[in-house]
C-alpha cells in the first residue's frame, strides 16, 4: 500500500504513477483469441464444444449440456430461501424502475422552412449477455445487463455463462428467471463471444454483446466490435474514497476492501486530509483482513495497488486528483458531498454521503453497476438502456421547402466535387 502526501516533493510524479501505472497486465491474448474466434466462425458448434471442453472441462454432448431451460431457471428461483428470493426481486424492481427513467424520447418537429425533422429510437432485435462463471459468478451482473435490455424493448435476450466442470450457479439461474431471459447457454470464454457474434448451428447471432469477463472475454469483445455492438472493455475494479476524519475508520476500511476483494488487480484508494485518520484506516484495513473470507485476494490488491493520499485541503485538492484517476466508483464520505461532487467530472458512479457505501450500488440501489474502468470514465459511461437502442433520424421536405435549402446544398456538393449529389437536388429545382 502506497502512502502519498501532496505536500511532499515528488508527489505529482508519484500520483501519476498511481493513476496511470499498469494493473494486472496479462500476457498478450490477442493471437489466441483471434484463433478461437476464427475457429468458431468457420466450424460453429464443433469449435465451441472443443474449446469449452478444453478450457472449462465441460463436455457439450447433448442438448442439456448446451443450454439451461426456462423451467430449470424457474426451479432455481423457487428453491431459493424466502429472504434471498425477496432480495433478488427487490433488486430487480429497483434496477428496472431506474432504467425505465432512461428511455429516450422521439423527436418530431417542423422547422421555419417547413421541413419536418426528427429521430426515432428503437431497440436492437437481440442482445447477448455474458455472465462470468467460476470465481466471479454474479447474479447481480445478470440483472444489471438483462433488465436495461428488457426496458429498452429487446425481444431476444441470450445469456452465455461458463459452467466449469459442469457446475451451475443456481442464483444466476434464478436471476435469469427474474429477468425473463430467453436463452441460457452453458459456454464461456472467447468461444462464447464468437458464438454470440457470428452464430453457430445451435446459437443464433445477436446484435449487441454486454457483460464483464476475463482477459480473453474482453479481448474477444474488442475483436468482434463492428460485427456487433459492445458495451465496453472492462478491466479490474476500482474504488476511490474521499473521506474526512469525522468518519469511522472501520467503515472506510470496509468500503476499500469491498472492491479489493474482487481481484488481485483491483485498486482501492483513499484521499483524506488528516494523517491520524489515514493511519487509523490503514490499521482498520489490517483488522478487517484478519476476519475476511476473501482476505488472500483483497490483501494482495491492497498491498500491490492500494494507496492512501493525504492532502492539506480536501475541497481544494481532491477533485483534481479524482478527475485524474477517473475511477469506476467514487465515494464522498463527507458532511457536504454535493460541494465535492460539483467539482468531479470523471467517475463511473458517485456515492454521496457517509451512509452510501458503494456496495449498495452493486446490488440494490438501481443505477447500473457495469461501469467504465481503467480511467475510461473520462470518455464513457456506465451501461444503460441506450446501449441496447439506436436512433434513426428522418427528414421530410415538402414541395415548397426544397427551394429554401436546396441551392445551398447543391453549392456545397459542387464544392466537394460531387456533381451527382448536386444534380439530385437541382433536377428538382428546375
Image: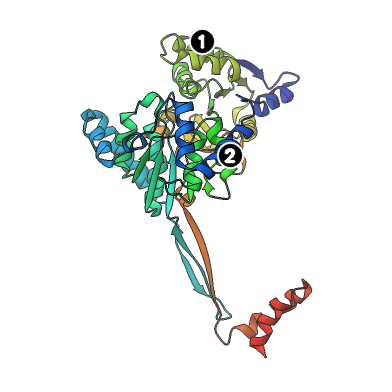
Snapshot quadrant of residue 158? top left
Q: Is residue 241 above or below residue 178?
A: above
The image shows residue 267 at horizontal and vertical percentages of 56, 24
- Marks 2, 1: nearer the viewer: 2
Among numbered discs 2 and 1, the one appearing first in the sequence: 1
Q: Nearer the viewer, residue 102 or 64?
A: 64
Residue at screen point 29% across, 38% down: 90
Q: Nearer the viewer, residue 232 or 8?
A: 232
Q: Nearer the viewer, residue 261 or 240?
A: 261
Please tell me the numbered disc located at residue 283: 1
Q: Which residue is outermost to the bottom?
A: 430
Snapshot quadrant of residue 95? top left
Task: Check the image and tell me how it is coloured.
Answer: rainbow
The residue tagged with tag 1: helix, strand or loop?
Answer: helix
Q: Which residue is mark 2?
A: 377
Screen quadrant of the N terminus = top right
Q: Is residue 389 above or below residue 109?
A: above
The residue tagged with tag 2: helix, strand or loop?
Answer: helix
The image shows residue 370 at horizontal and vertical percentages of 48, 38
Q: How many marks?
A: 2
Screen quadrant of the C terminus = bottom right
Residue at screen point 48% across, 30% down: 335
Measure how far apart labels 2 and 1 are at the Cα level.
31 Å
Residue at screen point 52% across, 29% down: 237
Residue 382 showing in the rendered view: no
The image shows residue 313 at horizontal and vertical percentages of 62, 26
- Specify few, some or many for label 2: CA neighbours under 10 Å numbering under 14, 14-19, or 20 or more: many
User: Mark 2 touching mark 1, by CB under 8 A?
Assistant: no
Amino acid at each position: 500500500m502506497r502512502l502519498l502526501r501532496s505536500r511532499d516533493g515528488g508527489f505529482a510524479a508519484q500520483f501519476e504513477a498511481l493513476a496511470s501505472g499498469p494493473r494486472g497486465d496479462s500476457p498478450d491474448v490477442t493471437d489466441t483469441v483471434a484463433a478461437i474466434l476464427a475457429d468458431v466462425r468457420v466450424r460453429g458448434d464443433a469449435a465451441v464444444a472443443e474449446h469449452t471442453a478444453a478450457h472449462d472441462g465441460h463436455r457439450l454432448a447433448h442438448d442439456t449440456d448446451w443450454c439451461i431451460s426456462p423451467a430449470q431457471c424457474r426451479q432455481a428461483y423457487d428453491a431459493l430461501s424466502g429472504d434471498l428470493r425477496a432480495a433478488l426481486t427487490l433488486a430487480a424492481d429497483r434496477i428496472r424502475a431506474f432504467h425505465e427513467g432512461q428511455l429516450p424520447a422521439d423527436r418530431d418537429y417542423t422547422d421555419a422552412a417547413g421541413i419536418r425533422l426528427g429521430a426515432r429510437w428503437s431497440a436492437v432485435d437481440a442482445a447477448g449477455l455474458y455472465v462470468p462463471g467460476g470465481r466471479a459468478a454474479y447474479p447481480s451482473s445478470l440483472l444489471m445487463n438483462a433488465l436495461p435490455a428488457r426496458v429498452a424493448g429487446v425481444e431476444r435476450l441470450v445469456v452465455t455463462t461458463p459452467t466449469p466442470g459442469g457446475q451451475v450457479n443456481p442464483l444466476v439461474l434464478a436471476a435469469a428467471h427474474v429477468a425473463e431471459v430467453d436463452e441460457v447457454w452453458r459456454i464461456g470464454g472467447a468461444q462464447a463471444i464468437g458464438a454470440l457474434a457470428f452464430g453457430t448451428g445451435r446459437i443464433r447471432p445477436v446484435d449487441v454483446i454486454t457483460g464483464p469477463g476475463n482477459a480473453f472475454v474482453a479481448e474477444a469483445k474488442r475483436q468482434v466490435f463492428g460485427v456487433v455492438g459492445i458495451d465496453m472493455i472492462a478491466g479490474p475494479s476500482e474504488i476511490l474514497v474521499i473521506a474526512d476524519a469525522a468518519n469511522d475508520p472501520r467503515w472506510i476500511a470496509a468500503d476499500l476492501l469491498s472492491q479489493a476483494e474482487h481481484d488481485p488487480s483491483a485498486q482501492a484508494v483513499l484521499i483524506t486530509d488528516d494523517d491520524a485518520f489515514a493511519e487509523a484506516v490503514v490499521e482498520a484495513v489490517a483488522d478487517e483482513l484478519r476476519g475476511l473470507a476473501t482476505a488472500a485476494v483483497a490483501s494482495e490488491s491492497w498491498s500491490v495497488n492500494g494507496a492512501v493520499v493525504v492532502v492539506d485541503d480536501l475541497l481544494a485538492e481532491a477533485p483534481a486528483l479524482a478527475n485524474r484517476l477517473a475511477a469506476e466508483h467514487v465515494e464522498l464520505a463527507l458532511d457536504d458531498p454535493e460541494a465535492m461532487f460539483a467539482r468531479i467530472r470523471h467517475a463511473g458512479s458517485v456515492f454521496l454521503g457517509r451512509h452510501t457505501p458503494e456496495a449498495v450500488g452493486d446490488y440494490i440501489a438501481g443505477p447500473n453497476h457495469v461501469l467504465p474502468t481503467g480511467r475510461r470514465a473520462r470518455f464513457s459511461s456506465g451501461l444503460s438502456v441506450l446501449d441496447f437502442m439506436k436512433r434513426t433520424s428522418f427528414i421530410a421536405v415538402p414541395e415548397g421547402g426544397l427551394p429554401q435549402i436546396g441551392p445551398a446544398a447543391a453549392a456545397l456538393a459542387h464544392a466537394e466535387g460531387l456533381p451527382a449529389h448536386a444534380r439530385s437536388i437541382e433536377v428538382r429545382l428546375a
